[in-house]
Image (spheres, grey):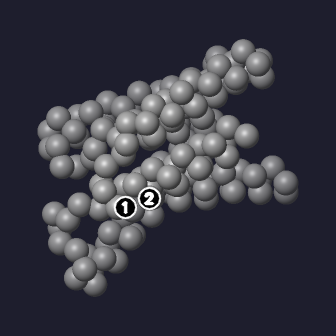
Amino acid sequence: MVTIFMIVLLITAALYDIKTMHIPLWLAISNILLGFFALYKGIMIDDRNVREYTLTIVILVSVAITGIVLRVLKAEVMGIGDIILMITTGMILSGEELVLLLGMTLILSGVFSGVLLVMGKVGRTTKIPFVPFLAAGTIVTELFFYMKGII
């Protein structure tokens, strides 16, 4: 159920990002609350060991540091809303899911941007919204792990 809420919030954020290149504060806060609820549920209710979250925590800290460094070095690279959504989405997923999500997000955004660049629709400095790729990567990741569980 948490995953469904996460995907709905990401799709909503993606639509805002496409239209305005901005993530509303209420969406960021909603994602943060959902992320903390997912961590609480995983550790306290589902009785998972905190060690299971070690990979996730290491990746999230790496993403946060990378995002903040990119933001400080060149403010046009990535918005703080993108960083918040990446981190909070990662709080909901397992370590394996997070690795696949980050890979899928980078591949999708890279291919899309490359195609637009080759077609001459955008320039090298054109801003492209990131959250739609995060949402698409999340959906693909969740479908992959869902299908993996069925087979």
In the structure shown, which secondary structural element does the residue marked by tag 1 occupy?
helix
Query: Residue 144 sits in which quadrant?
Result: bottom right
For label 1, the residue is: 18
Q: Please give left or right for residue 83 compared with residue 57 in the image.
A: left
Q: What percent of the width, then of the height, locates residue 67? A: 30, 38
Residue at image point 54% right, 27% down: 33
Is residue 105 depicted above or below 126 in this figure?
above
Mark number displayed over residue 73: none
Residue at image point 17% right, 35% down: 72
The disc labelled 1 sits on which kind of residue? Ile
The answer to whether one can see residue 136 in this image is yes
The disc labelled 2 sits on which kind of residue? Leu
Residue at image point 49% right, 30% down: 32
For label 2, the residue is: 15
Q: What percent of the width, then of the height, locates residue 14? A: 44, 55
Q: Please give left or right for residue 6 compared with residue 126 in the image.
A: right
Residue located farthest toward the right when viewing the structure as drawn: 151
> Which quarter of the rendering shows the N terminus?
top right
- 2 and 1 marks in contact (CB < 8 Å): yes
Q: Please give left or right for residue 151 compared with residue 88 in the image.
A: right
Q: What percent of the width, then of the height, locates residue 82? A: 36, 44
The answer to whether one can see residue 100 in this image is no
Is residue 150 depicted above or below 58 in this figure?
below
